Image (cartoon, grey):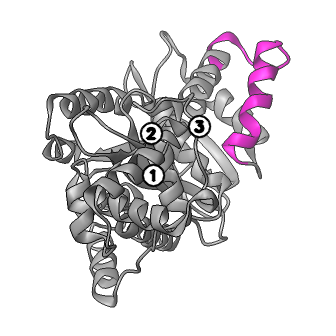
Amino acid sequence: MDDPHRPVTGLQALDARSRRLFRELVETYLATGEPVGSRTLSKTSGLTLSPASIRNTMADLAQAGLLSAPHASAGRMPTHAGLRLFVDGLLQIGDLDSDERRDIEDRVSAAGRRPEEVLSEASTLLSGLAGGAGLVASAEADAPLRHVEFVNLSPTEILAVLVSEDGGVENRLMRAPIGLPPAALIEAGNYLSARLRGRTLAEALKEIGEEIASKRAQLDGAASSLVEQGLADWGGPESRTLIVRGQGRLLEAVQAAEDLERVRLLFDDIERKEGLLALLDEARSGKGVRLFIGSENPLFSLSGSSVIVAPYRNRDNRIIGALGVIGPTRLNYARVIPLVDYTAQVVGKLIAGGR
């Protein structure tokens, strides 16, 4: 792991030779996944330097907090801070060619018309093309609502029908409160329709919850229980879908016992749905692709993984969800960043077109 107390040098503090060797080392590491030695750099850097001179420069870069060595006799590899410096200052991000763009469009659009089918295929596609695990957070219900209705399916299940002002219909299964009378379904539906009309769920849930808690809502006990159950089901992370595909691909990158332990920790991280949703939602605060390297996000402080995420938007250019790739820090950033960005654009257009 990186030493958080080690001083970190900025790119502007490196001379031309150090910068060139640093760039060559990081690019070689990202291509091979192996620590890079001085003899390798003497052959690939194009500089007329002896291995001893290169070792001295590498030692300086390590002292600056940009490189580390997994073992005393091994070569060097970039620290998380070194990777961040490389990505921000030296990485040349490529672009997808027309065939790659067409392939993404064809595969995602062929998945089906339903949003969950589009999102599932996008996650699978990202995993296959990027070599990590693909992540997609389902879109939040962002359209203002017009009507809410509850339908009794069985003694234990109720179907909540949410009709938005743009004509969209969303069905959500709920657990039925014990002994719920039919009249309570109508009463609860009328109550929520009146308070949600013209507003999104996110805008109204807190106010409705406070009204229920303070007993200001004019509902009998059964209808109040149904509304509270709806608030609980709709307001938390369980109300949204997190799709993860390609976790097995993370095992393909394992090269040593310590790599296997990192992947095991990463699997534990992926199981924390709420944390991953929060991470993906951070993409909503930016205009484009965001990259988190290792401990830059607390969720991956132990596994030391990298996450590349991008938001996708509806027809009004409003961000409604996010997708991305998670994997080891030696992801091919130059390729994965434009891949994630374009896939998000395609997903947004398809979902907006289906609404």
- Residue 349, magenta (yes or no): no
Mark 2 lies on a secondary structure that is helix
Q: Residue at x 58, y 24 (%)?
A: 232
Report x, y in % for residue 264. Answer: 24, 27
Between the C-alphas of marks 2 and 3, the distance is: 17 Å
In this image, 21 relative to 351: left or right?
left
For disc 2, the marked residue is 294
Between the C-alphas of marks 1 and 2, the distance is: 10 Å
State the count of labels: 3
Query: What is the number of the mark on residue 83?
Result: 1
Dominant secondary-structure state across the stretch colored magenta: helix
| Mark 2 residue crowding within 10 angstroms, few (<14) / some (14–19) / many (20+) | many
Q: Would residue 48 be seen by someone viewing this image from the given angle? A: yes
Question: Over which residues does the magenta segment extend?
Answer: 200-223
Query: What is the number of the mark on residue 74?
Result: none
- Mark 2 or mark 1, which is nearer the start of the sequence? 1
Mark 3 lies on a secondary structure that is loop
| Mark 1 residue crowding within 10 angstroms, few (<14) / some (14–19) / many (20+) | many
Q: Mark 1 is on which residue type? A: Leu
Q: Quadrant of the N terminus?
A: top left
- Mark 3 or mark 2, which is nearer the start of the sequence? 3
Between the C-alphas of marks 1 and 3, the distance is: 15 Å
Query: What is the number of the mark on residue 7?
Result: 3
**Of 206 and 283, which appears nearest the observer?**
283
Q: Mark 3 is on which residue type? A: Pro
Measured along the vertical axis of the image, is residue 63 above or below residue 176? below
Measured along the vertical axis of the image, is residue 351 above or below residue 170? below
Comparing labels 1 and 3, the label whose residue is closer to the camera: 3
Q: Mark 2 is on which residue type? A: Gly
- Mark 3 or mark 1, which is nearer the start of the sequence? 3
**Of 32 and 142, which appears nearest the observer?**
32
